Amino acid sequence: MNSVASRLTALSAGTDPGVRPSWELVPGWVRTMFTGAAGTAMSIALVACVVGFILAGVMLWVAHRQGSYGGGSTAKTYALAVAAGTIVVAGSSSFVAFFASQAS
């Protein structure tokens, strides 16, 4: 028990614990499946964001034509939410690329 406590206190910020990510213990098809699934999920999310932008634009156009300020406000909110989602999807691509490069 004392040795575990001493090991935990020995690890502090700035020290290297000596652990490196590796795909050596995982079969090759698992790595391919995970990278393929991540790419597919990001593609689907990007398509959903484009569809969301189109729907928000149509809602905004219809609200403007009918003079409905409440509908226009809702459409603007949807457009901002889709824009935030697009930023998250674009950022996730860089996260996946970063972690994939760390594991090779």
Image (spheres, rainbow, N blue to C red):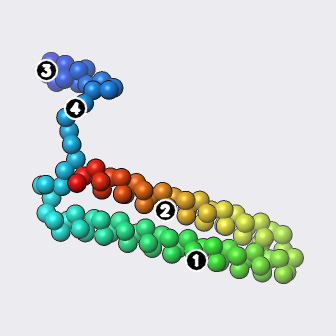
For marks 3 and 1, give the CA distance: 57 Å
Tag 4's secondary structure?
loop
Could you tell me if residue 5 is visible in this image?
no
Residue drawn 13% across the image and 54% down it? 24
For marks 2 and 3, give the CA distance: 44 Å
Tag 1's secondary structure?
helix
- The kind of residue tagged 1 is Val
Residue 40 in percent (x, y) is at: 38, 72
Residue 44 in percent (x, y) is at: 45, 73
Tag 2's secondary structure?
helix
For marks 1 and 2, give the CA distance: 14 Å
Residue picked out by circle 1: 51
The mark that comes first in sequence, 2 or 4, is: 4
For marks 2 and 4, give the CA distance: 32 Å
For marks 4 and 1, give the CA distance: 46 Å
The mark that comes first in sequence, 4 or 1, is: 4
Residue drawn 85% across the image and 80% down it? 66
Residue 65 occupies which quadrant of the picture? Answer: bottom right
Residue picked out by circle 4: 17
